[in-house]
Each structure stands twice: as structure tokens, then as C-alpha cells.
Image (cartoon, grey):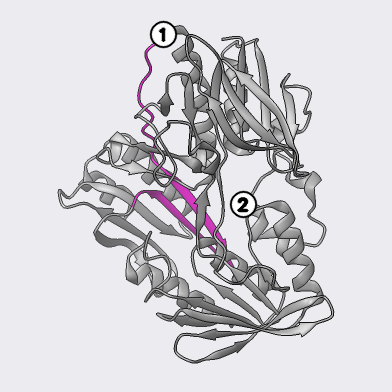
Amino acid sequence: MQRVAVIGASLAGLHAVQALRRGDYDGHIVLVGAEPHYPYDRPPLSKSVLTDDSVDESRLRLRPAADPDALGVEWRLGSTAVGVDSLPTGDGPARIRLDDGRGKRGPVVEADGLIIATGARARPLPSSEGIAGVHLLRTLDDALALRAALISEPGPVVVIGCGFIGAEVAASARTRGLDVTIVEAAPAPLLRVLDEAAGMAIADLHREHGAAVHLGVGVEEITTAETATGPSVEAVRLTDGTSLPAAVVVVGIGVIPNTEWLESSGLVIDDGVVTDETCLAAPGVVAVGDVARWPNRRFGGRLSRVEQWDNAVEMGSYGGSRLLAWATGRPVEPFEPVPWFWSDQYDRKIQLAGVPAPNAEIVQGSIAERRFVQLYTDDDDLVTGALCWNRPRQAIMARQLIGQGAKTSEIRDALS
């Protein structure tokens, strides 16, 4: 394997490159990134970038990319993969077509091994594109544009979607003293991740800090006013007829895996790139990070696509090693991590170790005091996850114990 292409120059792709070099791979690596920036940290985009006007790209760049020459890679930033002519085979290399971002067909990258780390993009609200004042948040440029809007438009802010990103943006806007309203179509925030009681605790947290929260109602349309430069947001009309005045609208309704460029590749695409339990999507092809969907044996082998910072680090590192193992014929253990996620909102640190399950039990503290530990157990009474509010030590313990396969009684006693 003389040449490796890593498509996606963010957290997972960068850690895959590091793993290749740690594994003594001395071949050529080309690292392709759609954004013009060197790899940077994304969690601050919804938090400190929006609340601290001094935070810029230099403070966000990931440490391994601080010296771009140190990794010995060929950087192709500002280039987007648009298609695959072939995957690596014994008869020839992978051929990935690029677009240089200027509407011209860029060069074809050839490689003996391919790591897919193209991540995901923010899901837009239908019919909202081209309206000034409507923002998505996924990239550094998105965050800087939103921060500029929050500074220049001190009017009402409407956040559509109360997932973790939407909730963090709402908290940041309230920290700036802005009038904030959150709109969530589900009966409680984060029902895809948390149980209803924990989700309602997030809604109540925002209400306690002065934000208005509308639950169980959707968005009918974004109404606009015509300006010299085109339509500009004026209000958000909800499905119950409520009209919310808005100077800034932030849409946080999930993400879409960046897989369109792979549609004719022959890989299995289903809400991401589907891989085996070792992140191998095809011979010589590994998928990692937000774009990858794999069967995590630790949690029953169901296909998982995990949109978390920590998973991108672990999976990226694993993926680089996995590609080397494929090239040398070395067997590997499956990738079966205990996911871990955190969200900072106001003065609360919300952490989730593992994955949710149908049964939830508070084992320490209480939701009312906003300091608690909640265990999730499956129908076999096995602990699959722990939600911790302002209990960081217990979150670390929970992750370790779940990873060790500890008994439910042992985990309950340790965390209570």
C-alpha cells in the first residue's frame, strides 16, 4: 500500500492520519477537505465562539494540525469529493474525483487505500435557503456568521430544534442577553436520545434562564420582508398559528451524512456508509466518524452512527490502524466503544456515557435540583448508559464500568 487517500479533513480524518503514521506507514497520504481551514475543534462553535468575540480560527485549530507539515501529508483543502470512478482492487487503485470549489472538475486522486471521513452537514429547513437572517451551524464559517448576526441584530432569536446543538446555541444567545425562543416539534427535547423526564429538564433549564420554549409544535413557514438585497427574516409562523418575531433564526434539526459522492461506488449507503464491525466498508476502504454506520457488538450489534467528538477521535484512530491491518492481513478486534458525549448549557454540564435504553432510573440526586445521575437499563436489566448532570466524576466512572461489563448492581452502587 503505497498511497492512501483520506477524504475528510476534520477530527476523524486527522486522527486516522495520525494512526497511520504511528503505525509506521511511510507511504504517501493525501488528505482532502471540503473546507479551506486546517482541522479545527467543532464543539466550541455552538458555545465559546458565539459568546466570546475573541475566539478565532487560531484558537480552534486541533493540536495535530498546529504544524501542518509535521504529518507529512499532501493537503487538499477547499476540495470536495464528487464521485468515485473505482474502489481499490488488486488490479488497480481507487480513483476519487474532486471539485476545486470553483465549478471546475478538479484532479482525480488515486490511492491503494481509502479512508472515508466526510462527516455530515446541517439539515436545512425546507424553503428557508436564501433568506437573510436564517442560519445553520456546522462549520467555523457558519459560527462566525452567526456570531456576527447576534452582535449586529440585537432583536429576537428563534432556535428551531432543541437537540444538543440547538440547546447550546440558545444558551449562548441568552448568555449574550438576547431574547430567545426555542421551537421543538417533539413533546420534549431530545426524545431521540433521552427519556421524556430528562428531556423536559432541558426545557425547564432554558425557561429558568429566561428563554421561551414551545414544545409539540412545528414550523409552518418563515415569513420575510423584502429588502434591497433580497428577502430577510421577519417572523417564524408555527403550525398552531403562533407568530414569533425574529431578527435571527437558527435551524438545528439534525444532520445529513455526506455520502452523495459515493452513490455509484458500490458501497452500501444507508444513513451513512455501512461497514462491518471493524469499520471496513469494502476491501481497502474504511469509514470513520459521523459518516460511518457500523454494528457495535457491545450494544447488541445494531447499526450505529454516532455524531460525537469522542467517537470521531476513537474511530478515526481505529480506522487508520484498521486500514494498515487490512494491507498486511493482520486480524483486528472489532470496534466496540462505549460512546460518551457532553453538552455545556448555562452552568450545567450534561454528560451521557453509553447509549439510552427503555428503562430509566435516578440513582443519585434529583432532576429538580439539576444535579443527578440517571441509569438506562435494557429489558434484561443490563446497564447500557448513564446520564449525568453536573456529575462529571460519575460520568467517567459509568463509562469505565459499562466498558468493563460490570453488573447492574455494581454500577448502581458505585454511582449512587
Could you tell me if residue 4 is visible in this image? yes
* Crowd tier of the residue under label 2, counting other residues whose Cα lies within 10 Å: few below 14, some 14–19, many 20 or above: some
Type of amino acid under label 2? Pro
Label 1: which residue?
329
Mark 2 falls on what kind of element?
A: helix
Type of amino acid under label 1? Gly
Classify the position of the N terminus by image quarter. top right
Mark 1 falls on what kind of element?
A: loop
Q: Left or right of 321: which side holds 383? A: left
x 73%, y 78%: residue: 231
x 67%, y 28%: residue: 31
Image location (x, y in percent) of residue 232: 73, 79
The answer to whether residue 322 is above or below residue 152 is above
The magenta segment is 330-355
Label 2: which residue?
43
Image location (x, y in percent) of residue 288: 50, 34
x 47%, y 9%: residue: 90
User: Does the magenta segment cover residue 344?
Assistant: yes
